[in-house]
Image: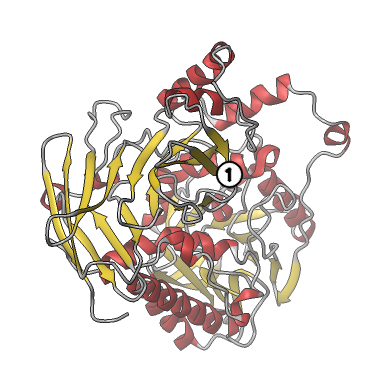
């Protein structure tokens, strides 16, 4: 808790100095967090074409019940030609949660993340024409989720379960859901180095890449995702391949189940 | 470690509070209501913790002992414990003779501080859990209740109560060591009146809470409580129950919750989507809904979907 408090304090104190570095496009932040300019420059690379856009839906509970597992649903299906979705928080020792490149999937993703304190959460959506559209919501939290050690270490068998995937496809609704067993250690807890999945790539049976998720430290322990496809074009089988920062390979195949 | 207590102290010193905060100090209005001969109940609001209710959401029971009143569950803060003490001395000048904590949730034991010199009884595991989790509960309670919590320190039970026939300050009880709402849930049957005090194994017209729940164990415990056939039941939250409705309502809600979450997992839903579920009329009217349903999704869904979804590698 101390480390996280200091880290966020450092960001807050740095605020006024950073504000001098005005972004190319200055927006009026609907959540008035005081941090958005900074992330617009540092996280998104200070784009020339960017706006807040109500069509980007970011849904989450008003208050985080479990700081280790805050559910979020990002929906950018109102936009065409989405290249990538950057999900981030304004306040937290590590703001970037993940980047989703939907490819052949719909620009919509369900995820969970570790929250450190009350914060705005944003989905910054870049289209093929290099325009950024940003949506968000506010989540209240008691905090501490980012700086505590992974809960997996309380049990003895976490190493055996590493990379184990539960999941399947739902052909009728065009859904894929997967849960990957991994500690997702942020490196912020004393004496525990960063240990996270770097990427999860989805492809069809011919090896054609469908979509990819680039994960960062704040993604929850045992990452859980729902991905969405057009039911008419969703393949009957999807391969998942990924790697963590220690070189462990992650592999699975999602198939439609019996029901639904 | 900078705690929320320290942070609050800092705020109080540096921010000019509105005048009415000083004009009207926060106070609990606790009214013991006689429910059976020699037994009173203080009924909590059927709500979630808020700055408005000050955390006075729990039921406390008072039973006449030989040397004072036996207090079952001590409320959410030091200030609450002090208000209890004042109310209790109006019933019996000698005050509290012993305290029992039904389980380790903060609204049931954070008033202990005021009675630290008395025997404070609980199941052994409840004591261990209160010691292990008291500080993190405390941080959260300061966040939720602010100044109502001023000066509150978690004080764990000091005496282990083993299940079986027990005598507390000259009064006979059957102590049942159950689980499901938490890992250790105590229910008490008062020998003289047959009153069943369930702790949070039973709720009435207030949504059950699940932060440490094991739904299957909870159902087993409810079956055991139904089998007692008690003439009156004092649930952890909600009004006194003379028909057994608290047990059936809690059972039905937990069954619905389990079925709803299982079905959602079978359909590949994420937590946020489940929160769109419209509660059935019989549960929508419970106190603290839909917030408790949302909280339960967070508590329970990960475990349920892990069991439901097939292995993919
Ligand atoms: Zn409880």
- The quadrant of the image that shows the C terminus of chain B is bottom left
Element carrying mark 1:
loop
Circle 1 is placed at which residue position?
A: A53
Q: Is residue A158 above or below residue A3?
A: below
Front residue of this view, candidates B61 and A77: A77
Q: Which residue appears at 65% of the width and 38% of the height?
A: A30
Q: Disc count in the image?
A: 1
In the image, residue A139 sits, relative to residue B254, either above or below, namely: above
Q: Could you tell me residue A104's position as x and y percent?
A: 30, 56
Residue A135 horizontal side relative to residue A181, left or right: right
Q: Is residue B241 left or right of residue A229?
A: right
Q: What is the chain letter for disc 1?
A: A
Q: Nearer the viewer, residue A52 or A189?
A: A52
How far across and down, in percent of the image, does residue A162 sit?
15, 49
Judge whether residue A81 can be spotted in this image. Answer: yes
> What residue appears at the point 41 percent right and 73 percent down from the top-left corner?
B218
Residue at 28%, 67% (x, y): give it: A234
Q: Count neighbours of disc 1 (C-alpha within 10 A) and say few if under 14, some if 14 to 19, many if 20 or more.
A: some
Is A158 placed above or below B258 here?
Answer: above
Q: Cβ of disc 1 within 8 Å of ligand 1?
A: no
Q: Is residue B153 left or right of residue A196?
A: right
Tell me which residue sits at (50%, 31%) in the image: A91
């Amino acid at each position: 808790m101390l480390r996280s408090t200091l880290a966020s304090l450092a960001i807050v104190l740095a605020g006024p100095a950073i504000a001098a570095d005005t972004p190319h496009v200055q927006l009026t932040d609907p959540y008035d967090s005081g941090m958005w300019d900074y992330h617009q420059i540092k996280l998104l690379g200070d784009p020339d074409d960017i706006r807040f856009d109500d069509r980007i839906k970011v849904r989450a509970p008003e208050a985080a019940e479990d700081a280790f597992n805050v559910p979020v649903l990002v929906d950018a299906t109102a936009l065409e030609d989405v290249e990538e979705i950057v999900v981030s928080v304004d306040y937290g020792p590590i703001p970037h949660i993940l980047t989703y490149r939907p490819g052949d999937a719909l620009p919509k993703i369900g995820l969970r993340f570790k929250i450190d304190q009350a914060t705005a959460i944003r989905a910054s959506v870049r289209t093929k024409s290099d325009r950024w559209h940003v949506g968000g919501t506010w989540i209240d939290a008691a905090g501490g989720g980012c700086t505590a050690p992974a809960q997996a270490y309380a049990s003895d068998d976490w190493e055996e379960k590493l990379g184990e995937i539960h999941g399947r496809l739902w052909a009728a609704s065009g859904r894929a859901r997967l849960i990957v067993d991994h500690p997702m250690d942020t490196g912020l807890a004393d004496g525990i180095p960063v240990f996270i999945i770097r990427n999860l790539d989805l492809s069809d049976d011919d090896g054609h890449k469908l979509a990819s998720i680039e994960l960062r430290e704040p993604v929850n322990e045992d990452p859980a995702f729902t991905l969405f496809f057009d039911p008419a074009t969703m393949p009957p089988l999807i391969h998942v391949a990924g790697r963590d920062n220690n070189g462990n390979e992650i592999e699975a195949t999602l198939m439609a189940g019996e029901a639904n | 470690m900078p705690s929320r207590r320290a942070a609050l102290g800092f705020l109080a010193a540096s921010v000019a509070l509105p005048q009415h905060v000083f004009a009207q100090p926060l106070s609990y209005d606790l009214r013991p209501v006689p429910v059976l001969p020699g037994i009173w109940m203080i009924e909590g609001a059927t709500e979630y913790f808020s700055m408005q209710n000050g955390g006075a959401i729990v039921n406390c029971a008072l039973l006449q002992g030989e040397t004072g009143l036996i207090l079952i569950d001590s409320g959410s803060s030091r200030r609450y414990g002090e208000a209890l003490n004042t109310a209790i001395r109006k019933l019996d000048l000698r005050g509290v003779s012993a305290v029992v904590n039904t389980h380790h949730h903060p609204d049931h034991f954070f008033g202990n501080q005021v009675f630290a010199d008395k025997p404070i009884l609980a199941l052994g595991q409840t004591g261990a859990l209160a010691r292990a989790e008291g500080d993190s509960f405390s941080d959260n309670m300061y966040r939720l209740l602010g100044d109502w919590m001023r000066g509150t320190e978690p004080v764990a039970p000091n005496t282990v109560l083993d299940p079986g026939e027990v005598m507390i300050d000259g009064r006979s009880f059957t102590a049942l060591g159950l689980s499901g709402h938490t890992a250790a849930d105590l229910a008490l049957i008062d020998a003289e009146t047959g009153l069943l005090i369930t702790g949070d194994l039973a709720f009435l017209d207030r949504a059950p809470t699940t932060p440490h729940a094991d739904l299957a164990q909870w159902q087993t415990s409810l079956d055991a409580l139904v089998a007692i056939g008690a003439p009156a039941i004092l649930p952890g939250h909600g009004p006194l129950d003379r028909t057994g409705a608290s047990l059936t309502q809690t059972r039905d809600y937990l069954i619905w919750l389990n079925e709803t979450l299982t079905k959602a997992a079978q359909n590949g839903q994420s937590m946020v989507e489940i929160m769109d579920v419209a509660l059935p009329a019989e549960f929508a009217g419970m106190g603290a809904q839909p917030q408790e349903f949302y909280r339960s999704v967070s508590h329970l869904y990960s475990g349920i979907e892990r069991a439901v979804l097939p292995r993919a590698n």
